[in-house]
Every structure is written in structure tokens, then in C-alpha cells.
Amino acid sequence: MKKIFLVILAFFVAASVYSQNDGINKLSSSFKIVRLKYSGGGDWYNDPSAEVNMMDYLKKNTVIDVDESKFYSVDINSDDIFNFPFILITGHGNISFSDTEVKRLRQYLERGGFLYADDDYGMDKAFRREIEKVFPDQKMQELPFDHKIYNSHFSFPAGLPKIHEHDAKPPQGFGYYLNGRLCVYYTYETNISDGWAEPREHDDPPEKREESFKMGTNIIVYVLNN
């Protein structure tokens, strides 16, 4: 019995080491949305109800094994980041990544992680500047409307839905790729995650909130299947 226990223990230790060194830790089967902390002065923590409500929506409308619906967050410099295949960055105002954080975020993405960035009106300039440090070898690309992310679960033939007016520009979805895999998805001039927040936060009409939840579902389903 002791030998069996030691063999099992060795397996999980080896799997954990492999996950930390070579890929995102997949030992936990339950999905969670994890907010990325950042420096620079922007409110990375705003609307903490957003992820809670989005996770509840996933439980009701998909077969995804979703973890407890609560607000999760992680620091780029923490090894915990490698436990989460999906992280969200949003907020208003400035973002600043140190040289170490740039390398860590690149490492996270190279190991199979996914970053969803949602401009909460005021984040655009800073996010574009900082993410270019992570991808000095390529330019941000706008995703075409026929990209699978717009049809992975619900159909959005015209691309992103417009949730908030902001500057009254059309919504756009951009991405970065590593080895042919979309690893960063950036939504601009729509604010999908604000639609996930409690209705009293932004007074979004029910139909807009539903569109935001459906698009959020598409993003997550796409990530978990690619």
C-alpha cells in the first residue's frame, strides 16, 4: 500500500513539475475566470461582479465544468498564473508592465495561456503600448468576422456586439498569435465585461447584457477548444 501511495504521489509531483516548466497547469479540471493584477494606476479590480455573473452564465448555458463563482485574481509574478489557462485584464487608465512582467507574460502565453483584454474606456492606449513589449516581433491583427471566436457557441456573423457607446466607434476585436494559436484577444469600443456586471453598475438593458454574456461564452468556449 505504501508503494502504491508513493507511486501516485510521484506521478502528481511529476505532472505538476511538467506543468510548471512546460505548459499551463491542467491538473484542475474546473474552469475559472481570473483577473490579472497590474501596476500603473489603472483600476484592474473594477466590477468584481463581472466574472461571478459570467461564470454563473456558463454553468447555466454550457456543459463546461466551472469552478465556484467568485472573484479570482492573480499577479503576473506569481507562479499561480501557470494554473490558469484563461486570464482577464480590464480597467480604466494606465497599465505598466516591468521588464520582468513582460517576460513572465510572454512565458505564460508561450506555455499555452490565454489573455483576454477588454477595454473599459481609457485602457486602450496603455494596453497597446504594453502588449507591444510582449510581442515586439509582430503587430496586433484585427480578427475577421468569420473567425471561429464569433461562432464557437453562439453566432455573431457581424463580429462583436456593441455593449457600450464609448466614442461611438464600431466595436473591434484584435489578436496576437503564437505558433498559429490565438493567445491574446482584445475587444475595443464595446466593453464586453461591463455587460457581465450587476445591472445597477452600468444600467445596461437586458438585451445588451445577454449579448455580452453570449460573446463571453464564445470567447471561453473558443479558448477551451483551441
Image (tube, grey):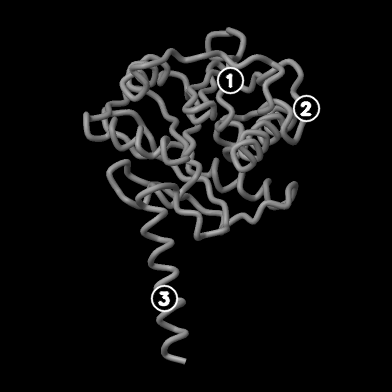
Question: Would you identify the image quadrant in which residue 45 lies?
Answer: top left
- The alpha-carbon separation of the residues under discs 2 and 1 comes to 17 Å
Question: Which residue is depicted at the point 40% across and 73% down?
Answer: 10
Secondary structure under tag 3 reads helix
Q: Nearer the viewer, mark 2 or mark 1?
A: 2
**Which label's residue is closer to the chain start, 3 or 1?**
3
Quarter of the image where the C terminus is located:
top right
Three-letter code, disc 3: Leu
Q: Earlier in the sequence, mark 3 or mark 2?
A: 3
Residue at 38% over, 21% down: 127
Residue 62 percent across, percent down from the top left: 73, 48
Q: Check contact, mark 3 vs mark 1: CB within 8 A.
A: no
Give the residue at mark 3: 9
Closest to the observer, 108 or 180 = 180
Precedes in sequence: disc 2 or disc 1: 2
Check whether the beta carbons of the residues at disc 3 and disc 2 lie within 8 A of each other: no
Residue 139 placement (x, y as % from top left): 43, 13
Residue 205 versus residue 99: which sits nearer the camera? 99
**Label of residue 142 in the image:** none
Q: Is residue 196 left or right of residue 129?
A: right
Instruction: Say which mark, if any, is on residue 190.
Output: 1
Q: Is the residue marked by circle 1 packed among few (<14), some (14-19), or many (20+) residues within 10 Å? A: many
Q: Callout 2, which amino acid?
A: Ser
Please provide percent x and percent y for residue 119: 48, 23
